[in-house]
Amino acid sequence: AFSERMGWGFGWLSGLGCDFGAGFGVSFGDEERSRGAIHYNYQDQGFFMDEMHGVSVFAKDDDGQIYHTYSTYGRGLDSLNGAYRYIDISPKGRNEDNGMSWLRHHDRY
Protein backbone atom coordinates (compact mmCIF):
# COMPACT_ATOMS: atom_id res chain seq x y z
CA ALA A 1 0.00 0.00 0.00
CA PHE A 2 2.84 2.43 0.86
CA SER A 3 4.65 1.73 -2.42
CA GLU A 4 1.44 2.44 -4.33
CA ARG A 5 0.82 5.64 -2.34
CA MET A 6 4.34 6.87 -3.18
CA GLY A 7 3.86 6.01 -6.86
CA TRP A 8 6.84 3.65 -6.97
CA GLY A 9 6.95 1.43 -10.05
CA PHE A 10 9.49 -1.09 -8.78
CA GLY A 11 9.06 -4.12 -6.55
CA TRP A 12 9.52 -3.92 -2.79
CA LEU A 13 9.62 -6.57 -0.08
CA SER A 14 8.61 -5.98 3.51
CA GLY A 15 10.07 -7.43 6.68
CA LEU A 16 6.83 -6.74 8.56
CA GLY A 17 5.88 -9.63 10.80
CA CYS A 18 9.30 -11.34 10.79
CA ASP A 19 12.60 -10.88 12.62
CA PHE A 20 14.64 -9.65 9.64
CA GLY A 21 15.00 -6.09 11.02
CA ALA A 22 16.07 -7.37 14.43
CA GLY A 23 18.64 -9.64 12.81
CA PHE A 24 20.19 -6.72 10.96
CA GLY A 25 20.11 -4.37 13.93
CA VAL A 26 17.42 -1.91 12.81
CA SER A 27 14.30 -3.13 14.67
CA PHE A 28 14.04 -3.11 18.45
CA GLY A 29 11.52 -4.68 20.79
CA ASP A 30 10.61 -3.98 24.38
CA GLU A 31 13.51 -6.11 25.67
CA GLU A 32 16.18 -4.09 23.84
CA ARG A 33 14.69 -0.74 24.82
CA SER A 34 14.23 -1.80 28.49
CA ARG A 35 18.03 -2.05 28.86
CA GLY A 36 18.28 1.74 28.58
CA ALA A 37 20.19 1.62 25.28
CA ILE A 38 19.95 -0.13 21.94
CA HIS A 39 22.84 -1.38 19.82
CA TYR A 40 22.59 0.45 16.50
CA ASN A 41 25.21 1.51 13.96
CA TYR A 42 27.91 -0.51 15.74
CA GLN A 43 27.50 1.23 19.10
CA ASP A 44 25.10 1.51 22.01
CA GLN A 45 22.64 4.37 21.59
CA GLY A 46 20.49 6.02 24.25
CA PHE A 47 17.40 6.60 22.13
CA PHE A 48 14.32 4.43 22.10
CA MET A 49 12.73 4.03 18.70
CA ASP A 50 11.17 0.83 17.39
CA GLU A 51 12.82 1.12 13.97
CA MET A 52 15.93 2.81 12.61
CA HIS A 53 17.19 3.02 9.05
CA GLY A 54 19.71 0.78 7.38
CA VAL A 55 20.51 -0.69 4.00
CA SER A 56 21.71 -4.23 3.37
CA VAL A 57 22.74 -5.71 0.03
CA PHE A 58 22.51 -9.37 -0.90
CA ALA A 59 23.69 -11.41 -3.87
CA LYS A 60 22.25 -14.70 -5.10
CA ASP A 61 24.51 -17.12 -6.97
CA ASP A 62 23.51 -19.52 -9.74
CA ASP A 63 22.83 -22.28 -7.21
CA GLY A 64 20.41 -20.10 -5.25
CA GLN A 65 22.78 -19.47 -2.32
CA ILE A 66 22.23 -15.97 -0.87
CA TYR A 67 25.15 -13.91 0.46
CA HIS A 68 25.03 -10.80 2.62
CA THR A 69 27.54 -8.49 0.93
CA TYR A 70 27.09 -5.08 2.59
CA SER A 71 25.25 -3.16 5.30
CA THR A 72 25.32 0.47 6.38
CA TYR A 73 23.40 2.46 8.97
CA GLY A 74 22.93 6.03 10.18
CA ARG A 75 24.89 8.58 8.16
CA GLY A 76 26.21 5.77 5.95
CA LEU A 77 22.98 6.09 3.98
CA ASP A 78 23.41 9.80 3.21
CA SER A 79 25.26 9.16 -0.05
CA LEU A 80 22.28 7.14 -1.30
CA ASN A 81 19.92 10.12 -1.01
CA GLY A 82 20.77 12.60 -3.76
CA ALA A 83 18.57 15.31 -2.23
CA TYR A 84 20.91 15.55 0.77
CA ARG A 85 23.72 16.79 -1.48
CA TYR A 86 21.67 19.91 -2.25
CA ILE A 87 20.23 20.34 1.23
CA ASP A 88 23.68 20.08 2.81
CA ILE A 89 25.08 23.00 0.79
CA SER A 90 22.17 25.31 1.63
CA PRO A 91 22.65 27.96 4.37
CA LYS A 92 20.80 26.00 7.08
CA GLY A 93 21.55 22.54 5.75
CA ARG A 94 19.22 19.96 7.21
CA ASN A 95 18.47 22.15 10.24
CA GLU A 96 18.25 19.04 12.39
CA ASP A 97 17.60 20.56 15.79
CA ASN A 98 14.88 17.97 16.33
CA GLY A 99 16.10 14.91 14.43
CA MET A 100 14.59 14.48 11.01
CA SER A 101 11.21 15.99 11.87
CA TRP A 102 11.57 18.24 8.81
CA LEU A 103 11.28 15.22 6.49
CA ARG A 104 7.84 14.51 5.05
CA HIS A 105 6.52 12.28 2.28
CA HIS A 106 5.55 14.06 -0.92
CA ASP A 107 1.84 13.67 -0.14
CA ARG A 108 2.17 15.32 3.30
CA TYR A 109 3.34 18.79 2.29
Image: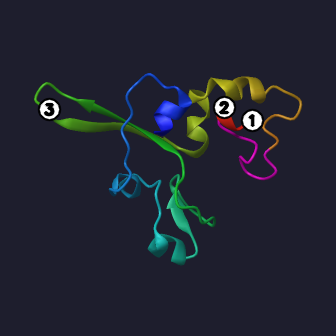
| In this picture, residue 17 sits left or right of residue 50 | left
Q: Which residue is drawn at 44% across and 22% down?
A: 9
Q: Which residue is drawn at 61% across and 41% down?
A: 75
Most foreground residue, 69 or 90: 90
According to the image, label 1 marks what residue?
109
* Number of callouts: 3
How dense is the environment of label 2, judged by Cα within 10 Å: few (below 14), some, or many (20 and up)?
few
Q: Which amino acid does label 3 sit on?
A: Gly
Outermost left residue: 63
Earlier in the chain: of badge 1 and badge 3, it is 3
Decide: is 71 above or below 41: above
Residue 58 lies in the magenta stretch: no
Decide: is 35 above or below 20: below
Secondary structure beneath label 2: helix
Mark 1–mark 3 distance (CA, rounded to whole Å): 43 Å
Secondary structure beneath label 3: loop
Q: Which amino acid does label 2 sit on?
A: His
Contact flag, marks 2 and 3 (Cβ < 8 Å): no
Contact flag, marks 1 and 2 (Cβ < 8 Å): yes
Mark 2–mark 3 distance (CA, rounded to whole Å): 38 Å
Q: Which amino acid does label 1 sit on?
A: Tyr
Give the magenta part as a residue range: 96-106
According to the image, label 2 marks what residue?
106
Mark 1–mark 2 distance (CA, rounded to whole Å): 6 Å
Earlier in the chain: of badge 2 and badge 3, it is 3
According to the image, label 3 marks what residue?
64
| In this picture, residue 93 sits left or right of residue 60 | right
Residue 64 % position (x, y) = 14, 32
How dense is the environment of label 3, judged by Cα within 10 Å: few (below 14), some, or many (20 and up)?
few
